[in-house]
Image (cartoon, rainbow, N blue to C red):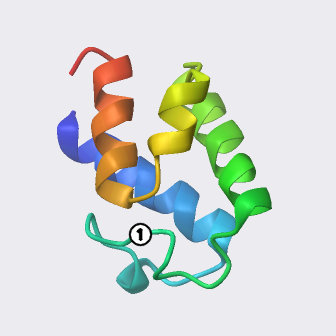
Amino acid sequence: MTMDVQEKVIQVLVNILQVSPEEISTKTTSDDVEKWDSMNHINMILALEQEFGIRYDEEQVVSMLSVGEIIEITKGMLGL
């Protein structure tokens, strides 16, 4: 299940940021991807919430500035 979460998160980011999967790793941050701006950050959050059927709180949204952090927060929300 853990790998599924990581794969799904990366796929959502690939779709929203319009990058290839090879450009995204758990170490990728918002500074590494040109299209990871505030508007696409919100789009990513909404897409992830829909994908996983969860709701992030404001504190989580603000701290989700790396792929690894997004995966860890999402796994926590899912109880993994």
| Residue type of the residue flagged with mark 1 | Thr
Left or right, residue 27 beside residue 20: left
Outermost residue toward the right in this view:
39
- In which quadrant is the C terminus drawn? top left
What secondary structure is found at the residue carrying circle 1?
A: loop
Crowd class of label 1 (few under 14; some 14 to 19; many from 20; radius 10 Å): some
Q: Which residue has dot 1 on it?
A: 29
Q: Is residue 12 above or below residue 4?
A: below
Q: What residue do we see at 26% from left, 14% from top?
A: 79
Q: Is residue 59 above or below residue 21?
A: above
Q: What residue do we see at 49% from left, 77% from top?
A: 31
Residue 48 on image: x %, y %: 57, 39
Left or right, residue 68 beside residue 63: left
Residue 32 on image: x %, y %: 46, 82
Left or right, residue 23 beside residue 45: left
Residue 1 on image: x %, y %: 21, 33
Q: Quadrant of residue 39?
A: bottom right
| Number of marks drawn | 1
Q: What residue do we see at 64% from left, 51% from top?
A: 44
Q: Is residue 8 above or below residue 25?
A: above
Q: What residue do we see at 55% from left, 19% from top?
A: 54
Q: Quadrant of residue 16?
A: bottom right
Left or right, residue 55 beside residue 8: right
